[in-house]
Amino acid sequence: MNKVVHRAMGLTLYGVALAFVLGQCLPFQPLALINQAVAADHPPIVIAHVAPTTGRFTLHAEADRRGAEMAIEEFNSRGGVLGREVVLVSQNPTLDTRHAAEVAEDLITRNKIGFMLGAIDSGVAASMSAVCQKHGVIFINTNSSSPSESVENAHRTKFVFDASAANFNRALLKYALGNRKSKRVLLLTEDDNWGRSSAEASRQYVTEYGGKIVGEVVVPASLPDPVAALRQVAVIPADVVAVNVSGDNQIRLFAQIDPEVLKRQSWVIGEVDWEELYPAPGTPRPLYGITWAWNLDTPGTADFVARYRKRYGHTRLDYPGDVTHAAYFATKALLEAIERAGTTDNHAVIRQLEKLKWSARERMQHDAAYMDPVSHHLQQTVYIATWHPSSVHPERGQQILGHATPEQVRYEKERTTRLESLADTPHYVP
């Protein structure tokens, strides 16, 4: 295949990816192009981006894809990876874990994708990554923060790049309980894999920091009636309310909370993504955790923001957030691992990913980050933040109160994670 034809095919596939995101194509028909491409002399490296583009994580999925795009463009601008163009195709797994598993199976067996990244929803991540492990396909979990992703749902082929709710809650509960004489804690928990796993980690930290759990209010993942949940919370005397509610549910919940309540009680939220803040600038967020912010005074941040705004500055998310940052570095880590391995052989790439280390400067954070070879979870800086929006400059509403090192927020259960051996992981060479 000559260079002109190779480039044309890459652009065609990239167009397919955009069509998937916009929902303009039937699910699998356009991906037949991939099967034609893989028969060529120099086939592209095809990465499937899987994130729910409908439902309460729609903006998260868009932000996640943008991070992957930015990384891939960097590599393609200098000739691709191992002389092969990198192509991103997108598929919506929905929030149905059974359907997500079927999507993963089809992408691997029918469409012959090389790697998979994304997920956003932790239940979807667990479902799809189990299929990937069965086939030996490397799954890059860019932005799912359930503690279970790096413990009971961990796999040799899966690498998790977001900080988990266990990391965030450890920093937040220490901060919140340290400032109060009375330490009664109420859990407000979303009834899904992420919520339950996050609340379980919180229990340990409440005890560790001298607190006492006085009750738990469990809400459905759909959260049809935030007011009803808040009524339950109101009748339980508590000094700290530990919230593990995700996505658009946060916007609906905090839009109903009387600001006076937030003055009397300390409400902490395991994680609040930019996509839950920026689109709803008038909705308060008292205390929460993040991994990165566009206005951090860290090396490389200003340049990254400028690059993002040059391409996406006309969109609803005209400033980048933690989701885009995580997806960018997760994709970059995968492509750099392939380059270091000198092959797309999954066993060789896994070995490289397990040795991943970044300096604080490289990560645009305050501390060095590294991949834990036991749990396959990236250990990184966690920031404590609050949200004070301005109608004139809503992008400046996020205030960083402090940060914690990877070791300060480490989730101890990850030391006992058991991954499949490489010998028991099928070889896969896309």
Image: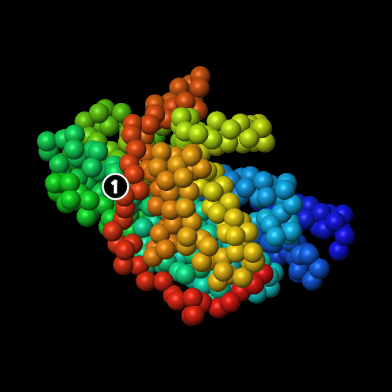
Q: Which residue is mark 1?
A: 408
Local secondary structure at mark 1: loop
Asked which quadrant contains residue 263, the reply is top left
Seen in the picture, residue 387 relative to 190 is either above or below; the reply is: above
Q: Nearer the viewer, residue 407 or 90?
A: 407
Q: Nearer the viewer, residue 86 or 219?
A: 86
Let me know if residue 378 appears in the view: yes
Question: Viewed as shown, does residue 342 lie left or right of 150?
Answer: right
Dot 1 alpha-carbon crowd within 10 angstroms: few under 14, some 14 to 19, many 20 or more: some
Instruction: State the residue at coordinates (81%, 68%).
Output: 41
Q: Position of residue 427 (x, y in %)?
A: 58, 77
Amino acid at pointer 1: Gln
Q: Quadrant of the N terminus?
A: bottom right
Q: Percent x, y for residue 325?
A: 52, 43
Name the residue located 47 percent from the left edge and 53 percent from the top edge. 357
| Residue 252 is at least partly visible in this image | no
In the rendered view, tell whether residue 334 sits above or below residue 268: below
Residue at the image point whose x is 19% and y is 34% from the top? 179
